Image (spheres, rainbow, N blue to C red):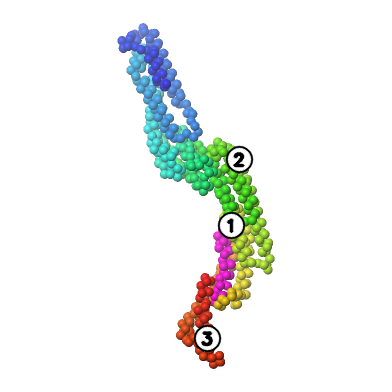
Amino acid sequence: MTMYKKASSIVLKLIIFKKKQLVLLLSANNSELVERLEGVVSAWANQIKQVLTESEQMRKEADDVGPSAELEHWKRRMVTFNSLMEEVKRPLVKRTLGVLQVTKSRILRTWRELDGDITVVANEAKDNVKYLYTLDKFFGPLGKCTPTSMLEHIPGLMTSIRMIHTVSQFYNTSERMTSLLVKVTNQMITTCRSYLSQGVARIWDHSRPVLLQRISDCCNLNKEYQRSFQSVRDKLRENPENRQFDFSENYIFGKFDAFCRRLEKVADMASSLESLAALQHMKVEGIEKINVRYQTIVSTTKSKTYDVLDLRRLEFDSDYADFQLQVQGLFQSLQSLLDFWFHQSLTVSSAPSELKPTFTERMLELLVVFESGPMACLDLKQHYLLLLQRYSRELELLRKTYQRQRERPPTGRNLPPVAGRVLWCRQLFRKIEAPMLILKKKLDLLKGPEMSKVIRSYNKMAMVLLQYEVLHLQGWSQAAESAPHCLNAALLVRHENSKVLDDQRIFQGISRPPFLFLTK
């Protein structure tokens, strides 16, 4: 039963007068009845004081309560004090106070002060409800939208909060505005948690790309929320005469920042597991044991039964530290495996007499396999620098090979001379081009004098090979131009000695094009 109902019952029990009986109290000699009325008014006053005191006390709210609770609180308060004001204005109360006024009772001073306090509090509640209702249209999207679709509502929400802070008569205190913004933050966090858990029992049941995307959406919401707040704050600072957004940003956004830091750790775990998933597709001897260790890490991570999104679950931090140690050990094993294969191949092919132009290409392809998978976070610079030096020596070897064989290059069986030379030239170019296609993607990593030297050598060698090919193609083209003239001549001519002669230029001209086509 509310205060005003209790107070009303006291009046009805203690004073039930008819109009004629009430007139008797006007006599100063009726001190007994006056005393009884003062006792009733005193009881009313005490109950009103109790209600006012309770209304000023700090509310006990859950730490994740949303902004809708703020509106509901002030609506309940408005109803309470409006009802109390109606009760105070009842005819019975007025007649009672009228009697005490005639007798000049001292309790009337206390009553008037309480009546003024009730009016102020009722007006405050009414005013606050009026302004908070302007935010009601945003409370639905805050609770139902995804973090991505919520972004379009944030600017309007911040504009409405700014209006309340600027115009409202009672709600514009720093404490109340901060409390409202904290509740908005709580609602955003609650929405993010629901979004991350949507459709699954635990967040690890999501596919990792989906989980990473949802985490990114939640963190982006936090950034946009703070950016919108800071935009309004900075705009208000341009005019110092306006009310400023002098609120504690750490208090307002601290919980959301802590939530995003937790999400960043979860994202780090998901990213690590996703990159290491490539282990099962790597075709390198020795990778099987490492893959078994990876599967163990995955099982351990998914076996945790607590809610990793609950910031109160501090055991997540220790589990995350253990996860990092296990993943670090896994990467070290991968590094050791790569070093083993790299140096083993380098030792086998390191003798100058056995130098093979395709060695650099093979090792670069191996690095690409590791780099595109779980080894992407490791430092492979030394491996690339070593292969760059090896490639430089191979370029020099191919240059010498070209100088030695360009006059009489080795050609395949049954190849015409020009087609054989072009094919030999293109094979040399492919040997220098394949490694460079990989190395040129690592210019930032390999930037330096050695890389510049290799690029110059490559460009010079490529230009020489191109000119060699063009020269022979032009020669063949010029020779082919004479073919129509030869076709006009007789295929068989009488010779002085052998009596029959066939023109070999015709057969050479028509036999080269197919081979030239195949070598392109």
- Outermost left residue: 20
Where does the magenta region start and end? 418-447
Compared with residue 430, is residue 230 higher up or lower down, i.e. above or below? above
What SS does tag 2 mark? helix
Question: Label 2 belongs to which residue?
Answer: 318
- Which tag, 1 or 2, sits closer to the chain's start? 2
In this rendering, does residue 13 appear at all?
yes
- Which tag, 3 or 2, sits closer to the chain's start? 2
Find out whether residue 38 is within the magenta segment.
no
Distance, label 3 to label 2, CA atoms, is 90 Å
Question: Which residue is located at x 50 percent, y 47 percent?
Answer: 210
What percent of the width, then of the height, locates residue 478?
49, 80
Question: Which residue is located at x 48 percent, y 45 percent?
Answer: 217
Q: Can you tell which of label 3 and label 2 is closer to the viewer?
A: 3
Q: Can you tell which of label 1 and label 3 is closer to the viewer?
A: 3
Disc number at residue 502?
3
Q: Is residue 231 left or right of residue 397?
A: left
Compared with residue 519, is residue 384 higher up or lower down, i.e. above or below? above
Question: Label 1 belongs to which residue?
Answer: 369
Question: Which residue is located at x 59 percent, y 44 percent?
Answer: 299
> For mark 1, does the 10 Å Cα neighbourhood hold few (<14), some (14 to 19), or many (20 or more) residues?
some
> For mark 2, does the 10 Å Cα neighbourhood hold few (<14), some (14 to 19), or many (20 or more) residues?
few
Q: Nearer the viewer, residue 105 or 263?
A: 263
Callout 3 amino acid:
Asp
Q: Can you tell which of label 1 and label 2 is closer to the viewer?
A: 1
Distance, label 1 to label 2, CA atoms, is 33 Å
